Image: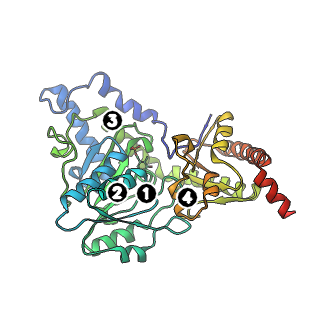
Amino acid sequence: MIYLDNAATTKTAPEVVEAMLPYFTELYGNASSIYKLGSESKKATIKARETIAQTLGAEPNEIYFTAGGSESDNWALKATFEAYQNKGKHIITSKIEHHAILHTCEYLEKRGAEITYLDVDENGLVDLEQLKKAIRPDTILISIMYANNEIGTIQPIQEIGEIAAEHGILFHTDAVQAYGQLPIRVDELHIDMLSASGHKLNGPKGIGFLYINKKVKIRSFVHGGQQERGRRAGTENVPGIVGLAAAAERAFRIMEEKTKKEIELRDYFISRVQKEIPYAKLNGHPTKRLPNNINFSFEFIEGESMLIMLDMKGICGSSGSACTSGSLDPSHVLLAIGLPHEKAHGSLRLTLSEENTKEEMDLVAEELKQIVDRLRGMSPLWEDFVKKQG
Ligand SMILES: *Cc1c(COP(=O)(O)O)cnc(C)c1O
């Protein structure tokens, strides 16, 4: 099998599993209990919070553990909307956010929020001038993702942070794809809230965190016990928290080497496709993109068919059409960068890890060439197109 879907989820690193195991088998105490077994769990969560805070240049008491990226996104938006109602009800976001942001915005719109969805250019970048123009006296929050999960485009986060800070507006970023892949300093970037998720950085699923700057007036998200300083109740997921911290520590330790390797493989594969497969368009920014992201649209092809044929060869990828999830709509991200429906449907996302090799990339490129040829060979539209060209 060749796994090229690391934006969907990643393999839990063996050292992460190892770090977690004792907290299932021996050190299973409740972190709130006062006996020794409980205090072991408590100690582990304190250490994990410190580790994660350090990776961001934050303070440990600004890290709130959650059940993952979706929960962190929901919390940031819903709680800000509630807590800052007397200042205003206007939120600025972008058209290419993850559904955890977009669907939460829709939910808030039904409750009186006014949302501006910024356009992006053909590479997926937000326009800073458009952002400035969108700001109103009643704007309470700007939420722009750090890096996009489909096309890999990295936003000008520092500039966005500065604009938000100048106007006294809170800035949240969904950094689920960026955290562990890129260096991030929340203070330098003027980030007030940041979402991250364990399973996107070789950590466990069902655990993540929301960084909340201590100046933010945030509301509780889950009511109950005093966990997470009373803001997110529920017995701590100690193995998950330990695993998340181990994954974060690992990601920052190997970042430089991993990034170098992934960029090499990414650019090698991109140039092969560009040379060897006609009518293929690279989606996303040519340079401001995640080290591991490849996204192409192939004309006259259905993404789903490509995925199925790749799967038959043991290759895992993802496509920009959502047919499998029961919807015929192509990806909102690909539409936002200006692709027509048929091109958005013919897109393929491959996201690498440091475990992939050049041999694998060669094999995938060869298979992909054949698959594209076969699928186009079956397409009446392609036949017409070729006739017109001839
Ligand atoms: C995966 C992802 C999420 C959701 O994270 P979960 O931990 O799966 O809930 C949110 N935003 C982005 C950009 C993602 O890639």
Contact between labelled residues 1 and 4, with CB atoms less than 8 Å apart: no
Specify few, some or many for label 1: CA neighbours under 10 Å numbering under 14, 14-19, or 20 or more: many
SS state under label 4: helix
How far apart are labels 3 and 1 at the CA level? Answer: 26 Å
Q: Name the residue under label 1.
A: 97
The mark nearer the N terminus, 4 or 1, is 1
Question: N-terminal of the two: label 3 or label 1?
Answer: 1
Which mark is first along the chain, 4 or 2? Answer: 2
Nearer-the-camera pick, 355 or 377 = 377
The spot of residue 348 in percent (x, y) is 62, 50
As drawn, the label of residue 105 is 2
Name the kind of residue labelled 1 in the image: Glu
Mark-to-mark CA distance, 2 and 4: 20 Å
- The answer to whether the residues at label 3 and label 2 have Cβ atoms under 8 Å apart is no
The answer to which of marks 3 and 2 sits earlier in the sequence is 2
Whether the residue carrying mark 1 lies under 8 Å from ligand 1 is answered with yes
Disc 3 or disc 2, which is closer to the eye? 2
Residue 162: x and y, percent? Answer: 33, 72
Q: Residue at label 3?
A: 240
Location of residue 363 (image quadrant) = top right
Residue 213: which numbered mark, if any? none
Kindly report the distance in space between the C-alpha atoms of the residues bearing marks 3 and 2. 28 Å
The residue at the point 63 percent across, 59 percent down is 282
